[in-house]
Image (tube, rainbow, N blue to C red):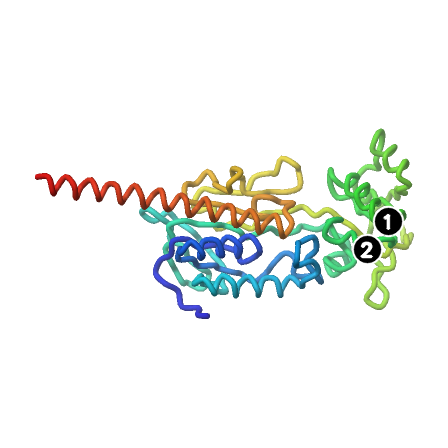
Amino acid sequence: MTEQLNDSYDVVVVGGGAAGLNGALMLARARRTVLVVDAGSPRNAPAEGVHGLLARDGMPPGELLERGRAEVRHYGGQVVTGEVEAAVRDDDGFGVTLTDGRTVRARRLLVTTGLVDELPDVAGLRARWGRDVVHCPYCHGWEVRDRAIGVLASGPMSVHQALLFRQWSDDVTYFAHTMPAPTGEDAERLAARGIRVVEGEVASLEVVEDRLVGVRLSDRTLVSREVLAVASRMEARAGFLATLGLRPVEHPGGAGEHIPADATGRTEVPGVWVAGNVTDLVAQVGTAAAAGAGAAAQINADLVAEETREAVAAHRELTSAGSR
C-alpha cells in the first residue's frame, strides 16, 4: 500500500466505488497496470448497509469498499486517495492531474465517479438522508416496512415512487409540496391504493430524540410520519471530463444529468469508458459493480487489439527487412 505513483498506467480508474473497484479488479487480473483514484466520498456513506447484493446483503458500505480495495491490491492494482482535477489528451493516451498536483499518464480511462444527490430545500431533510429519509424502495423498503411512510413530491416520478412504497406499507401519504396535486389517472391510482394526498408546501421535518416523527407544513400543520421518501435530482460527478469535451447531459428519464455511453460503457471520446451511477443514474451497487467489470473487459479487449496491431506492424517490418 503506497501513495507513490508510477509515471504511467494502462488504465486509470477515476472513482473508488463498486463500479471502479470491480473494474480495477478485472483489469488487474488481466495483468494490466491499474491506478484507482478514490476521492473517498461514496454516495451511500450515510446508509447503514448495502441491500439487495447477493452474499453481501446488509454489509456496511465502508466495509464493502475496504474489501474491494484489498482485492484490487492483491492482484497488483494500486488504490490511492485523491481527486482528479483534469484529464487531457496526451499523444496516444491521457495526462491525468490530481488536485494535489500529482500527474500520471494513462492509455485508457475508466470513469466511475458516481453522482451527487440534489435534495429539496426542506429544513432537516439533508441531516436525515440515508436514515429515515430514503429514496429507493429496493434499497430501504424492507427496513421501513409497515411504518408510516411519507413521499415528498419532487419530480415526475414521485407518484410512481409512492405506488412502489405502497408495496412495503399500507400507510403511505403523498405530500404534493411545491408541485400540483395529482389529477386524472395519477389521482385515481393513488386513491385506489389508499394513498392519502396532502397539499401544501413542506417546511421542515419534526425530529424527536434523533427519530423522525412528522412532517411540518408551511401552515404549521404537523402530519405524523416515521419515514420520508424523496426522489433526488441526480447529477453526475464528472466536471474534470470537460477538458476532453465530455460533459453531462440531461437523462431521458428526467431524473438528472449523466454522461452518455453505449451498452459497454464506451463514451464518444475514444479511450474513455464510464460505469456506474455517473452514466446509469438508477444503478444499485450490484448493477454498478457489474457495469464496471463489463467496461473493464471492453477496455482490456481494446488494448489487446491495439497491441496486436502494433505487433503485426513490427512483425511485417522485421519480415520485410529479413527478406532484403
* Mark number displayed over residue 144: 2
Quarter of the image for the C terminus: give it.
top left
Q: Are marks 1 and 2 in contact (CB under 8 Å)?
A: yes
242 and 251: which one is in front? 251
* Residue plotted at (48% across, 59% down): 37
- Tag 2, which secondary structure? helix
x, y (%) of residue 122? Answer: 77, 53
x, y (%) of residue 256? Answer: 64, 42
Q: Amino acid at mark 1?
A: Ser
x, y (%) of residue 313? Answer: 24, 41
60 and 30: which one is in front? 30
Q: Amino acid at mark 2?
A: Val
Q: Tag count in the figure? A: 2
Where, by quadrant of the figure, is residue 35 drawn? Answer: bottom left
Q: Is residue 216 visible?
A: no
**Direction from residue 14 to residue 46 in the image, left or right:** right
* Mark number displayed over residue 169: 1
